[in-house]
Amino acid sequence: MSRPVEYAVAVDRYLAATGLGTGSRRVYRIALATWAWGLVDRAAPLGRGRRNAAPPAVPLALLDTPQAARRLREAFAARSAAVGARTANRELSVLVAAVTWWRAQGWLTGDPVDGLRALPLPGPRDTGGGLDADRAREVLGLPAPLREQALWHLLHDTGASIERVLALDVDHLDLPGRRTRERLGGTPLRWGEATGRLLALLTLGRVAGPVFRTGRGRLSYRRAAEVFTAATRPLDPGGWGWTLRDLRGPGRR
């Protein structure tokens, strides 16, 4: 796919690839349009004026210029002051997801959102009963990195505890059988075809070590939880994001 010239076209292509529902795509589009104002050093309109205002035309290449990171930092600070940390954080999560996808397409060489961090908020909500089927489908369709996609699908399919899933090593998996090996003891974890494909890609060429890893070792519960909550914040009407426990649903192991 050729690199688009305009930021707005890049937004359209990203949203088309996400698989999000109509309502979520609308939320993402509004958030990404808001960042266009900051990229040209202008404050985004507020309230009804924001909904009716046409965002400025911005070349996608502007995101690869030295001034892009500074402008985004300043826009985030201004936006936080204008609408509050929760809304600004939600919009930042949308931008980070889009930039990650654009970089994966080779459309950006730099990372203009590197160093931008969400503002602290009270802890994320636990829905208690888990996400309903439609919401879970939207979460599992988010354009996340392979590691996160595999982890989220595995948690959703198996209903296992997060600690048990994060403790899995590559040699614990029976990939052809789509289950954990009997020698582990306890009830084997079983997963579906889509999860099996993701796990096969994630562990390709590996015979040992953690299934879910970082550059320094096994993925921690804390980091996995932070990534999930940040990724789901744009989908949560309250702006909090959800917890990994919500993926497991009610009555899970």
Image: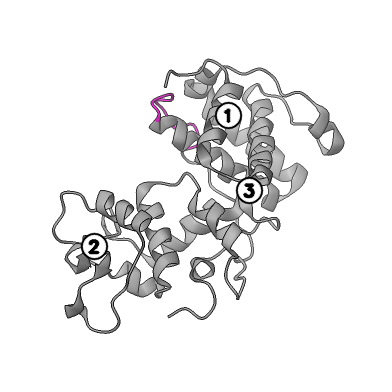
Image quarter hosting the N terminus: top left
Whole-number angstrom distance, CA of label 1 to CA of label 2: 35 Å
- Amino acid type shown at disc 1: Val
Quarter of the figure that contains the C terminus: bottom left
Per the image, the residue denoted by label 1 is 11
Q: Residues within 10 Å of mark 1 (few under 14, many from 20)?
A: many
Q: Is residue 111 magenta?
A: yes
Q: Residue at x 20, y 73 (%)?
A: 181
Q: Secondary structure at mark 3?
A: helix
Q: Nearer the viewer, mark 1 or mark 3?
A: 1
Q: Is residue 241 above or below residue 75?
A: below
Of labels 2 and 3, earlier in sequence is: 3
Per the image, label 1 sits on a secondary structure element best described as: helix
Mark 1 and mark 2 lie on one chain; the one further toward the N terminus is 1
Give x and y (percent) for residue 68: 54, 26
Q: Residue at x 45, y 65 (%)?
A: 156
Residue assigned mark 3: 90
Q: Is residue 232 visible?
A: yes
In magenta, the rendered stretch is 105-113
Q: State the residue at coordinates (13%, 58%).
A: 207
x, y percentage for residue 57? 66, 17
Q: Residues within 10 Å of mark 2 (few under 14, many from 20)?
A: some
Nearest-to-viewer mark from 1 and 2? 1
Front-most of residues 133 and 30? 133
Question: Is 200 or 118 nearer to us in this picture?
Answer: 200
Q: Amino acid at mark 2?
A: Pro
